[in-house]
Image (cartoon, rainbow, N blue to C red):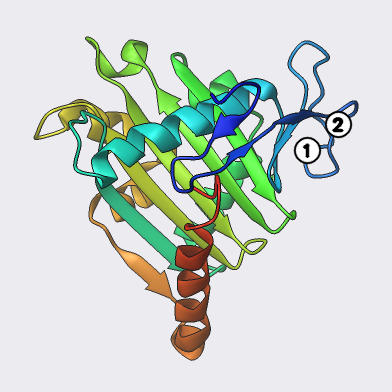
């Protein structure tokens, strides 16, 4: 924090979060007066708690990027630019699932989300000690590129190699097919649209350098 502002790890400036007085068009079914929708820079979060979760996660990853000591490590990823594929559709299904849906997420899981301009969406699925055992935590990180044109899934964990508990948790949440693709770090793109796919990926990387983008 910087006074009543939040310091972005990727820039030298701070931003003041704004609490919304009603639900956002991006998250129309999410409004809790005790945990209101919040905008930080140009990104909208369905709750203030969600905004805090993304800021903290961003700083934790920043420690790793700078080479500082960090136990939260990226280990796996997968991406798809093929909307018709099962993996792509499964990822969108998970993004659409209610955060409180215990049948979907199971116990010991917390879900946070944000959106930029209604075209990009990010989701954190945090797997706590109830899922991971001991003091370990894992995060499944989703990015929805430009309203469903591309999907990106990344896995972070505090668990040591060989990451067995993380793998089991990822398979349970994502399902065997999507989970297997992510664990094997498989990537999909439409053969007739590979140039557009790479343009989207470059756009994602460019977007990542802006405040609060990850």
- Image point 45% across, 56% down: which residue? 152
Q: Are marks 1 and 2 in contact (CB under 8 Å)?
A: yes
Q: To which residue does mark 1 refer?
A: 27
Above or below: residue 205 compared with residue 31: below
Residue underneath mark 2: 23
Left-right relation of 163 to 39: left
Which secondary structure lies at badge 2? loop
Q: Is residue 104 visible?
A: no
Q: Residue, x 43% and y 37% (percent of image)?
A: 58
Q: Nearer the viewer, residue 73 or 96?
A: 73
**Residue 211 in the image, given as x and y percentages of width and height:** 55, 49
Q: Is residue 90 left or right of residue 168?
A: right
Residue 17: percent from left, percent from top:
70, 31
Q: Quadrant of residue 108?
A: top left
Asked which quadrant contains residue 98, the reply is top right
Taking 110 as reference, is 151 above or below it? Answer: below
Q: Residue at x 52, y 73 (%)?
A: 200
Q: Residue placed farthest to the left in the image?
A: 161
How much space separates mark 1 and mark 2, taking CA atoms? 6 Å
Q: Is residue 165 above or below residue 42?
A: above
Q: Quadrant of residue 89?
A: bottom right
């Amino acid at each position: 924090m910087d006074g009543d502002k939040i310091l972005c790890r990727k820039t030298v400036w701070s931003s003041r979060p704004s609490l919304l007085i009603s639900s956002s068009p991006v998250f129309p079914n999410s409004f809790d007066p005790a945990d209101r929708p919040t905008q930080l820079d140009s990104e909208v979060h369905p709750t203030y708690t969600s905004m805090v979760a993304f800021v903290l996660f961003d700083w934790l990853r920043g420690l790793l990027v700078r080479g500082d000591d960090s136990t939260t490590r990226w280990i796996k990823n997968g991406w798809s630019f093929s909307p018709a594929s099962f993996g792509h559709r499964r990822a969108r299904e998970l993004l659409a699932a209610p955060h409180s849906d215990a049948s979907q997420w199971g116990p010991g899981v917390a879900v946070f989300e944000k959106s930029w301009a209604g075209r990009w969406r990010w989701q954190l699925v945090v797997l706590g000690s109830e899922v991971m055992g001991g003091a370990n935590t894992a995060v499944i990180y989703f990015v929805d590129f430009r309203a469903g044109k591309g999907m990106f899934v990344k896995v972070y964990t505090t668990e040591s190699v060989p990451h067995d508990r993380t793998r089991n948790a990822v398979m349970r949440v994502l399902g065997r097919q999507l989970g297997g693709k992510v664990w094997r770090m498989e990537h999909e793109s439409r053969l007739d649209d590979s140039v557009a796919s790479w343009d989207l990926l470059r756009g994602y990387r460019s977007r990542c350098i802006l405040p609060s983008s990850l």
